[in-house]
Image (spheres, grey):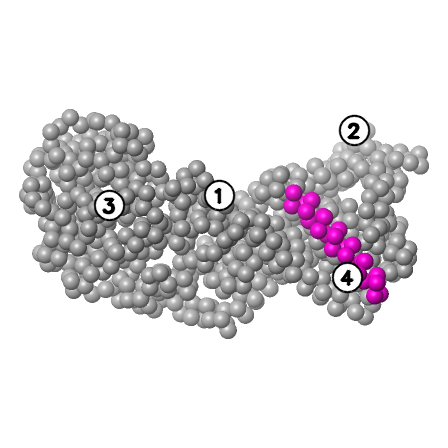
Amino acid sequence: MSPLLAELAKGATVKAAAARTGTDPALAEVMAQEYAALGLLQLPGQPQVCTTCHANSKKGLARLGCAGCPFAR
Amino acid sequence: MSCPHCSPEPRPKDAGIQVSTLEHPVVALVGNPNVGKSSLFNNATGLHQEVRNAPGTTVEMLSGVWKSAGVELFDLPGTYSLLAKSPDEQVTVDALAGRLDRQPSLAVVLLDATSLPRSLYLLGQVARTGLPVVAAMTMCDVAAAEGRLPDAARLQDVLGIPVVAMDGRKQPAELAVAVKGALTGDAHVRGVRGTPLPADATLEEQLADAQSLFVWTEDVQRQLGTPADTHAVTRSDRIDRVLLHPWVGIPVFAFLMWALFQLATTVAAPVMDWAESLVTGPVTTAVSAILSAVGLGGGLIEGLLVDGILAGVGTVFSFAPLMFIMFLAIAILDDSGYLARAAFVADKAMRAIGLDGRALLPLIVGFGCNLPALAAARALPDARQRFVTAIVVPYTSCAARLTVYILLATVFFGPNAGSVIFLMYVLSILMVIVAGLVLRKVTGAGVNRQPLLMVLPAYQVPRPLVLLSEAGKRTWGFMTGAGKVIIITLTVVWLLLAVPVRGGYTVGDVPIEDSAYGATAEAIAPVFAPAGFGNWQSASALMTGFVAKEVVVGAFAQAYAVDEPEDAAEPGTLGDKLTATFDASSGGHAGAAALAFMIFVLTYTPCLATLAEQWRMLGPRVTLAATGTQIAVAWLLAVAVFQLLKLVW
């Protein structure tokens, strides 16, 4: 787990996690968005991800965050 | 919007249409949104532009001839990343891979001088595709004014590709020269492997790839000597130091949950009464008056309309203020940024039963009323979490069930009534835990292995108008969805109560024990004999309790033809009759039977409104299966408790 991700896992805003890890805030924002796109974390205000999910028909595209979801299998 | 966990499907290569017959090499213009890409495109191509939709999408793409560079320029949709999350971004990804048109020979990547790390990451991703790259640095005037304009020459040295500082108001002549040169030379970004990940790359490989580009981006910044933006301690940081501290955060969380509980009970109750009285008072009087005026008063039609349909409407109306208050309170907690913190505080404990921290809020609200608890569960982002939470919420002992506990505990346990009621709440929590653990097994192994990873939002002042509107819409959704089921079922219950099955009574004027309802209660009463309360009065109270637990005490009073006690803690004549009935049906173990009855009340269907909401959330099959299981579990528990206690008590 990257240091930024580890800080976010402890409970932090992106800015706070960036400050604690010495990451540029703009880069930290990009990193958080990429982690979210990979399904590793949820961003504030992220849409209710499962309501329109078609993961069961696209198994190859299921992300890490879908690991606990029965529809992603 | 589709699930961001699932990227849009890349298009097959033959899905593209060949619209260009030009011999010019294709150059793709790539950049973050709002960094001057369109200005650059317009300045480069002038009037030689063509607008069309990307094949198979409604996403517009611009192409045009850049004469001074001798290329056909494609203006691709702005994106922050090539890990596409929207159809627009997927068009950019597909175009760079040559899946939409001709394969680009080169990419011009715009670098936002005011936010270089963000642009550098995209540059790294484009370089990863293997394309030669030229960088065009925009927003230079803004960055210069802020005193943080990167040195283009130094950046060129570090990146190993041409870097041109742009002036958006001028023709991009210098960039045209750089593009021409790069087309014949080697313009590959230093430090980035120019081989894209295979299409079947695993998630771990994708993560490792992204990670390596983050490291590269930081390395470029370091070589540039650009000082990272300093981070001032924000108000959110200061608040979080307190609220995320275990010794402070948990009590604050507990207090807010207590306040929510109060909202669902004490505060909402008078408003609910007022809303119901509006229907049962003036509206009912008006309907009765109209029916009398047209000669239909006092008969079956008035009974059906007033005691059936209007009673159902009254119930729905009585719940509406509660739902609105809860929706609004939850929305305020969410919008302020606190709900995410509460989820973090609760996550560890909740994960033990297969749920994450976000599920705690609905469960706590459930101790006030199960209905808004289900509404709160709808906001959970994960389908499995919603499913498990919606199934276990009915085991949280709502305030309505408390009236039944008070009545029976007072009658049968006297000075120990308080302890017995406390025991019911302990049992309620145990049921939630056990049901959660069972559902974790049933819904699949490995459930919720992922820790709750969510970025905490900054605190903000809640937006009143937005939240009021949202709460209003959700309340209306409840009234039109669950409301229909409630009205229909209450009408059916009235019909059963109105139809006599013996004694020569007329329809609508029949004592409960001689109605179809009473006869049904009598028929099912033997089912409860093993639990010690196999009498028709208890069966009828449970049937009515299926509709709403608030009316169980009233149903007992109606069955015994005594006045409903003003205070359940002072049962009077009703207490004597209950003692006699339970004593008879339990063979002299009235206390054990009463406890079994209370456990049944705790663990079977909480109320019709909750059932209707579950129906809306989970669909008929799951709801019916869950309800059946719940009733079976309730019966087994009641029987087990009675039979065990009978041995020692």
Could you give the CA–CA distance between mark 4 and mark 1, rounded to whole angstroms?
A: 44 Å
**Residue at 37% across, 52% down:** A36
Specify whether B189 is left or right of B379.
left
Within the magenta stretch, is there residue B384? no
Q: Count residues near mark 2 (Cα–Cα under 10 Å), then give few for <14, some for 14-19, many for 20+.
A: few
* Mark 2, residue position: B294
Identify the disc placed on residue B196. Answer: 3
Residue B139 image position (x, y, % from top left): 18, 52
Res. B631 in view: yes
Residue B517 image position (x, y, % from top left): 82, 40
Circle 1 sits in a helix, a strand or a loop, which is it? helix
* Mark 4, residue position: B406
Could you give the CA–CA distance between mark 1 and mark 2, rounded to whole angstroms?
A: 57 Å
Foreground mark, 3 or 4, reads 3
Circle 4 sits in a helix, a strand or a loop, which is it? helix
Q: Quadrant of the N terminus of chain B?
A: top left
Q: Are marks 1 and 2 on the same chain?
A: no
> Is residue B649 depicted above or below A56 in this figure?
below
Label 4 amino acid? Ile
Label 1 amino acid? Phe
Q: Count residues near mark 1 (Cα–Cα under 10 Å), then give few for <14, some for 14-19, many for 20+.
A: some
